[in-house]
Image (cartoon, helix red, strand yellow):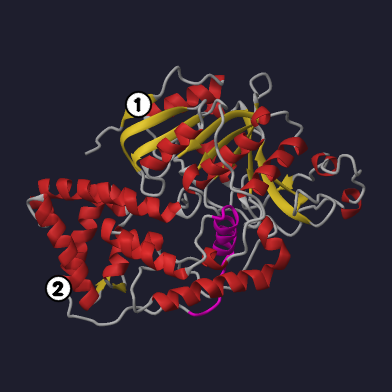
């Protein structure tokens, strides 16, 4: 659920001005949120190494919106004032996904990628969601090994996986105490509405990718009258938050794998992996068994069969890349002497802000996570049989099994707000089934569907004229297409 490579991030310096606590203490009992909504951000240049047009500020928001006169946290925001007088429509908040990804630098990225006729209509607003980056960042004190959540189910290692999951949950509670339950999607949506008020806007427009689609959908559910032009690109399934996320990856990988075997068989002359889909499949699973016996050195690291399954899950959505990778792994296995053992994860403490903030959302949003470790065992065994590539990874135990119960019910996305969803057919992180589910839940939405489209993120991330033009038309006019738009990705297999 992440877009990393296209989105540089920015650290706000220590000079970022904070709103005086004395001002916040003056909230009236009748309208306690007015204190937050009436803040005047002290905008300043983000960093001398960054664009001179990018400004940063820090505001305060309630930790708990049910108790707005209680504890507060800081929220780092940024802006590119690109709106041209006479053409300016308003502000557009942008979010890169996650949960756990920083968003301060995204306005600069989007201004560079958007057509000028679109960007000149909006002041682009970025923010680090609560708990992330410069917005009261969370940490659980996790070692690098404890940050590894990619864990296949095996009978002999399951007890260690349970211990890992319990340890992560306990460390997060110990480090963050009673504030941990408030770092959720619903509260981030409330933070967005405070940003709207601070900027003096009656409505906001929004562009969110991946997890950012769920954040945008939750905002539209909670604040429909303040929702302007919303684009939700590469959507998660709002009905499977969040226990079903990894399971959805496993389900979506199987048709991608089948497509890969067919494509690779047609290119047997190039890759020598088999001249029928059945032969390609046989070659792949033989390679997995071989790597389990003797890990394969590839790109500087020894990989066993589980490593290869996890690494290639997303790669299968792009047949050519997957064929090249499997051929290279096979070549390495054929040419190198057998080497036993696998690399040991680093046990040193690392920067765990992404993991800490991600788990706080994944575990704190919804109560659908089973509490009995044996349920995870049963699910992993079942799904490894049904979805051999990734089923046991997607259903294995997580720290959410030992997390405190959420303080709010999960948000049911079910409204008629008019907005636009965008989806590639072959998206590894937010598979098509989830995008279709989001489209159905948002009854007033239209979908721009890239048939044959590969990759995670569509609009300006994988530029294609048909889909980009449809999004640009909506952002420019506010008018949704009369019906869903189907584009044909050029050159798709």
Q: Residue at x 11, y 45 (%)?
A: 266
Location of residue 482 (image quadrant): top left
Residue at the image point whose x is 72% and y is 64% from the top: 178
Q: Quadrant of residue 204?
A: top right
Pinpoint residue 439: horizontal percent, then vertical percent. 46, 33
Residue 163 among magenta residues: no
Location of mark 1 (residue): 486
Give coordinates of residue 365: x percent, y percent.
Answer: 59, 52
Q: Nearer the viewer, residue 445 or 476?
A: 445
Marks 1/2: CA–CA distance: 46 Å
Task: Please state the extent of the stretch shown in magenta in the rendering.
Answer: 347-367
On screen, residue 130 versus residue 68, left or right, reads left
Label 2 neighbour load within 10 Å: few <14, some 14-19, many 20+: few
Question: Would residue 473 be found to the left or right of residue 153 on screen?
Answer: right
Identify which residue is drawn at 46% across, 50% down. Answer: 1
Secondary structure beneath dot 2 equals: helix
Of mark 1 and mark 2, the one earlier in the sequence is 2
Q: Write down the residue under mark 2.
A: 335
- SS label for mark 1: strand
Q: Is residue 480 above or below residue 7?
A: above
Categorize mark 1 by other alpha carbons within 10 Å: few (<14), some (14-19), many (20+): some
What is the x, y in percent for residue 430?
41, 46
């Amino acid at each position: 659920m992440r877009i990393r490579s296209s989105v540089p991030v920015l650290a706000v310096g220590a000079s970022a001005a904070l709103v005086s606590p004395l001002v916040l203490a003056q909230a009236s009992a009748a309208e306690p949120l007015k204190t937050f909504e009436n803040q005047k951000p002290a905008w300043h240049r983000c960093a001398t190494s960054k664009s001179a047009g990018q400004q940063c500020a820090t505001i305060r928001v309630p930790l708990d919106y049910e108790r707005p006169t209680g504890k507060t946290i800081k929220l780092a925001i940024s802006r590119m004032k690109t709106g041209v007088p006479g053409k300016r429509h308003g502000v557009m908040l942008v979010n890169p996904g996650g949960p756990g990804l920083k968003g301060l630098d995204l306005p600069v990225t989007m201004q560079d990628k958007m057509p000028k006729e679109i960007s000149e209509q909006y002041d682009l607003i970025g923010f680090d969601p609560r708990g992330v980056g410069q917005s009261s960042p969370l940490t659980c004190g996790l070692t690098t090994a404890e940050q590894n959540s990619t864990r296949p189910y095996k009978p002999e290692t399951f007890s260690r996986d349970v211990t890992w999951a319990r340890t992560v949950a306990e460390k997060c509670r110990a480090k963050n105490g009673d504030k941990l339950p408030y770092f959720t999607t619903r509260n981030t949506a409330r933070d967005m509405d405070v940003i709207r008020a601070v900027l003096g806007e009656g409505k906001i427009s929004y562009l969110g990718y991946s997890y950012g689609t769920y954040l945008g959908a939750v905002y539209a559910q909670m604040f429909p009258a303040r929702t302007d032009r919303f684009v939700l690109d590469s959507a998660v399934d709002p009905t499977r938050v969040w226990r079903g996320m990894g399971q959805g990856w496993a389900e979506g990988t199987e048709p991608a794998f089948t497509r890969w075997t067919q494509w690779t068989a047609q290119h047997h002359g190039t890759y020598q992996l088999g001249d029928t889909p059945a032969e390609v499949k046989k070659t792949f699973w033989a390679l997995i068994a071989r790597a389990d016996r003797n890990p394969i050195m590839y790109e500087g690291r020894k990989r066993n069969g589980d490593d290869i399954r996890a690494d290639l899950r997303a790669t299968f959505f792009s047949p050519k890349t997957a064929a090249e990778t499997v051929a290279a792994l096979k070549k390495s296995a054929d040419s190198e002497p057998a080497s036993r053992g696998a690399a040991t994860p680093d046990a040193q403490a690392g920067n765990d802000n992404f993991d800490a903030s991600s788990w706080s959302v994944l575990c704190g949003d919804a109560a659908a996570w089973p509490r009995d470790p044996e349920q995870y065992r049963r699910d992993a065994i079942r799904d490894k049989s049904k979805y051999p590539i990734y089923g046991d990874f997607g259903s294995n135990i997580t720290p959410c099994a030992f997390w405190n119960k959420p303080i709010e019910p999960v948000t049911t996305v079910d409204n008629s707000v008019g907005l636009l969803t965008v989806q590639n057919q072959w998206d590894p992180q937010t598979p098509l089934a989830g995008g279709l589910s989001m489209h159905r839940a948002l009854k007033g939405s239209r979908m721009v569907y890239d048939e044959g489209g590969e990759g995670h993120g569509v609009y300006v991330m994988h530029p294609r004229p048909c889909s980009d033009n449809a999004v640009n038309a909506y952002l420019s006019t506010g008018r949704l297409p009369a019906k869903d738009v189907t584009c044909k990705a050029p050159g798709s297999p």
